[in-house]
Amino acid sequence: MALSGLDIYKLLPKTNCRECGFVTCLAFAMQLAKKAVAIEKCPYLSVESRSKLEASSLPPIKLVTIGDGEKKLEIGNESVLFRHEEKFHRPCGLGFMIEDVLSDSQIKEKIAKISKLNFERVGQALEVNLVAVVQKGNDERFLEAVDLVAHESALNLVLISENTGALKKALERVKGRKPLVYHATKDNLAEVAALAAEYKVAVVATSPDLEGLSGLTQELVAQKTEDIILDTGKKSIQKKISDLTQIRRLALKKSDRSLGYPVLAIVEQDDPYEEVIEAATYISKYASIILIKGTEQWQALSLLTLRQNIYTDPQKPLQIEPKLYPIGQVTDKSPVLVTTNFSLSYYTVLGEVEASKVPSYILSVDTEGMSVLTAWAAEKFTPGKIADTLTKFAVGDTVSHKQMVIPGYVAMMSGDLEDECGWKVVVGPKEAAGIPSFLKNL
Ligand code: SF4
């Protein structure tokens, strides 16, 4: 856990010798707390104080990387329990399990489906991250499946097997991809640690209880394996959520380094709806990787949308650039629709304008990323602001009419807006879904 300036001060020699470049030890401590200066600047720290300060400067949850290249997945490094305290930093990785007992054509079919699970929402790309090969058959078939999946998919790989011999052979084939290895238990710890050290890959440590998990990670670290992901195995949703919450709490609030690692959850439900509900629960709190069986588009889209919402900085709404956007084959007679620069507002309006097939302009007003009603209440979406935006982007030079459409929720400003800018103001629908019929009748 990060120390305060005063906590740090207590660990310093308090001689005010100035060799660190600061007038007092307290001034140095305050800068150290802000991470604006290095510990090494003070040459008089005791060994004990130095190790305490070094430990406090480490992230409470380790950053772990899976894979290599552009699509590599980085997870961990989280610093808060609740996103309103700051934000969650590293979006949870979403992956799909493929069992080696499937035929080659079935595996190819699944991979082809998984490769299509990419979406765009509010201007951001939503992508899945991992594909896991699960050994159910013999070693030979597992290796064939690993080869096939690695050949067909560029996603990060997870190798799941109870057999460390098979894991070693598989690692030899795909070592350049830096796959995640599942898993180290109390029974095979030394062998898996040796694989992690030899191939420089992250490993999953599995134990049903937190005490066992803590012991496993300490043993792995002692054997020079530091890229660890935790798993408490298959449990009821209530028990799993309890584990995930306790791990996060102990790492952040009790500075328990042995549990300061990202956490993986495997979700295997026969009912695809149950599977998504369970996976969504763990994405909300606090899984860093989710592996599921289902590969349906609706499953991936709902989980990726949830992930996007949870990992968006709550203090910085997603925004688009405020400007005049031409949609379709616009002319100088095309209608002008006014909205805010909150991404969700803009993209919702955009979708409906495109659906209407009526070429239009969307004027996005800078409301610091607030939605229509919030911005209006906060006086960020005012007649003056809209009039200034019309001028700034020379909308009057782009179209030959002087008529704009405002959202129905801010109909109350239409009179003031007409007075402010001299344009005719038409009140549009309250909900974006009404835009297509509105535009066709305009
Ligand atoms: S060098 Fe160390 S002992 Fe000297 S003033 Fe700086 S913090 Fe204090």
Image (tube, rainbow, N blue to C red):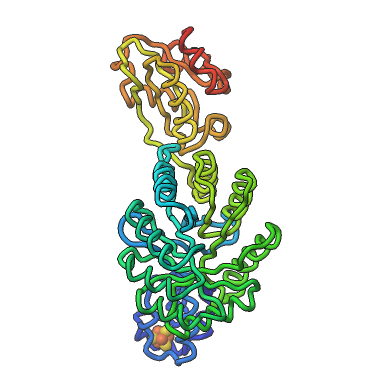
The residue located at (44%, 79%) in the rendering is 225
- Res. 143 in view: yes
Q: Note whether 206 is above or below 288 in the view shown.
A: below
Image quarter where ligand 1 lies:
bottom left
Query: Residue placed farthest to the top in the image?
Result: 441
Of the pair 415 and 221, the residue shown nearer to us: 221
Of the pair 260 and 415, the residue shown nearer to us: 260
Where residue 381 appears, x then y in whole percent? 50, 29
Q: Note whether 387 is above or below 147 in the view shown.
A: above
Of the pair 205 and 137, the residue shown nearer to us: 137
Q: Is residue 423 left or right of residue 415?
A: left
Of the pair 303 and 259, the residue shown nearer to us: 303
Tell me the quarter of the image containing the N terminus: bottom right
- Res. 94 in view: no
Where residue 394 appears, x then y in whole percent? 31, 21
Q: Is residue 336 left or right of residue 160?
A: left
Where residue 397 appears, x then y in whole percent? 28, 16
Quadrant assignment, res 50: bottom left
The residue located at (36%, 58%) in the rendering is 72
The residue located at (40%, 77%) in the rendering is 195
Q: Note whether 228 is above or below 412 in the view shown.
A: below
